[in-house]
Image (cartoon, rainbow, N blue to C red):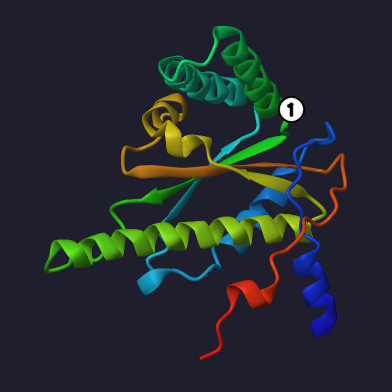
Amino acid sequence: MNSDLHTFLRTRRSVRRFKPEAVQAATIQRILETATFAPSAHNLQPWRFAILTSLESKFHLAEAISARFSEDMLADGIPETDIQIRVERSIRRAREAPVIIVFCHDSTRVDPQPNAISQQAEAIMGIQSTATAGLQLLLAAHAEGLAGTWICWPLFAPQETLAALNLPVDWEPQGMIFLGYPAESPAAPERVRLEEIVKWI
C-alpha cells in the first residue's frame, strides 16, 4: 500500500545508541546490494564502501580521525581538557557501533569534459550520487530492523581515513554510517513546514 510505504519512509530515525548484538554478514550484504540500486549520474555508480566490524578496525579509524581533530581544535584555542573529553566520546561511539560503513566517492568514475566548469559539475554529480547511495543504505538498513546515523568525520580527515583503512587514493571519503540494532527510539524531529521550503511555479 502507498500509505504503508510512506509510513516506512517517515519512520526512519537517526540512532546513536545500539544494542551489542552483532549484525550478520548476510544482512550487511543485502543492505549494500540495495544501496547500489540508487540512481547515479550517467549510471557511473561511483560509490565505494569500506565495512568495519572488528573492534580493532573501528578503534584504528576513530583514533586516526580523532588525532586530526585534536590538532584542529588545539589550533582553534579549545582547552585541552575539552579536547580530551570530545576525543574520548568520539572513540567510544565508534567502538560501540556494531558496524561502521565508510562510504567514498571514486574520483576516477567521471566522464571527461571539455572545460573546467563542466569537469567540476561532473565531480559534484558524482558526490551527489554517492550521497544518494548513502541514503538508500540507511533505508535498506531500516527495512532490516536496523538503524544508523550519518557521521561526517571523514570529510574533515580524508587522508587520515584513507591511511587508517588502507584505501585507494582515488576513494574520496564522504562520510560514514554507524549501524546496528537500535537501543533507543527517538521521536521524529520537528519538520520545516512545506510552505517555507516549496515554491509552486
In this rendering, position of residue 51 left or right of residue 171: right
Where is residue 45? Give x, y as percent: 42, 63
Report the residue marked by disc 1.
Answer: 96
Q: In terms of depth relative to the viewer, which is nearer, 81 or 151?
A: 81
Where is residue 99? Give x, y as percent: 68, 37
* Vertical placement of residue 88 versus 11, above or below: above
In this rendering, position of residue 103 left or right of residue 58: left
Q: Which residue occupies 65% across, 28% down?
A: 94
Q: Find the residue positioned furthest to the front.
A: 196
Q: In terms of depth relative to the viewer, which is nearer, 44 or 127?
A: 127
Q: Quadrant of the N terminus?
A: bottom right
Where is residue 26? Give x, y as percent: 71, 49
Q: Which residue occupies 70% across, 71% down?
A: 193
* Vertical placement of residue 124 versus 175, above or below: below
Q: Amino acid at mark 1?
A: Glu
Counting other residues with Cα less than 10 Å from the Cα at mark 1, is it few (<14), some (14-19), or many (20 or more)? Answer: many
Where is residue 178? Give x, y as percent: 66, 40
Q: In terms of depth relative to the viewer, which is nearer, 182 or 68?
A: 68
